[in-house]
């Protein structure tokens, strides 16, 4: 498993901004665009870049804390 797989990433539509917003709150505030697939791809690349930057500086990554909601039974 890649390090980036530990961090929850998602894309959602913003009515207010009229664009798709890609989020990974544990690492970045977000990116935006008109195409949800492109936004997710760019989000994935940015997360990989952030991880590489942390590693190149010898800094510890924040622990993943945002998790997808689980079905409540």
Image: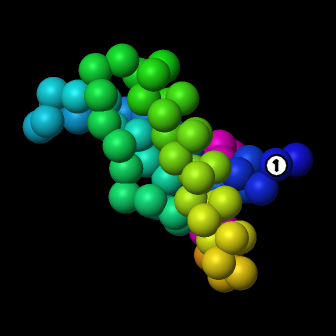
Front-lying residue, 73 or 18? 18
Residue 44, position in %: x, y?
A: 58, 39
Please check the rendered image and state whether residue 34 is part of the magenta-colored stretch, yes or no: no
Residue farthest right in this picture: 1
The answer to whether residue 44 is above or below residue 64 is above
Residue 54 at least partly seen: yes
Give the residue displayed 15% in from the left and 27% down from the top.
18
Q: Where does the magenta region start and end? A: 64-73
Front-lying residue, 8 or 40? 40
Residue 19, position in %: x, y?
A: 23, 28
Snapshot quadrant of residue 9? top right
Residue farthest bottom in this picture: 59
Please check the rendered image and state whether residue 65 is part of the magenta-colored stretch, yes or no: yes
Mark 1 residue crowding within 10 angstroms, few (<14) / some (14–19) / many (20+): few
Front-lying residue, 66 or 20? 20
Residue farthest left in this picture: 16
Give the residue displayed 74% in from the left and 48% down from the top.
5
| Helix, strand or loop under label 1 | loop
Give the residue displayed 48% in from the left and 19% down from the top.
37
Q: How many marks?
A: 1
According to the image, label 1 marks what residue? 2
Residue 13 at least partly seen: no
Residue 12, position in %: x, y?
A: 37, 33
Give the residue displayed 57% in from the left and 40% down from the top.
45
Residue farthest front in this picture: 56
Residue 40, position in %: x, y?
A: 50, 31
Q: Is residue 29 left or right of residue 45?
A: left
Snapshot quadrant of residue 36? top left
């Amino acid at each position: 498993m890649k390090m980036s797989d530990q961090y929850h990433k998602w894309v959602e539509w913003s009515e207010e901004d009229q664009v798709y917003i890609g989020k990974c709150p544990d690492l970045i505030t977000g990116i935006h665009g008109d195409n949800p697939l492109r936004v997710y791809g760019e989000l994935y690349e940015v997360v990989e870049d952030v991880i590489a930057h942390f590693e190149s500086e010898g800094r510890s990554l924040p622990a993943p804390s945002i998790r997808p909601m689980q079905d409540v039974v």
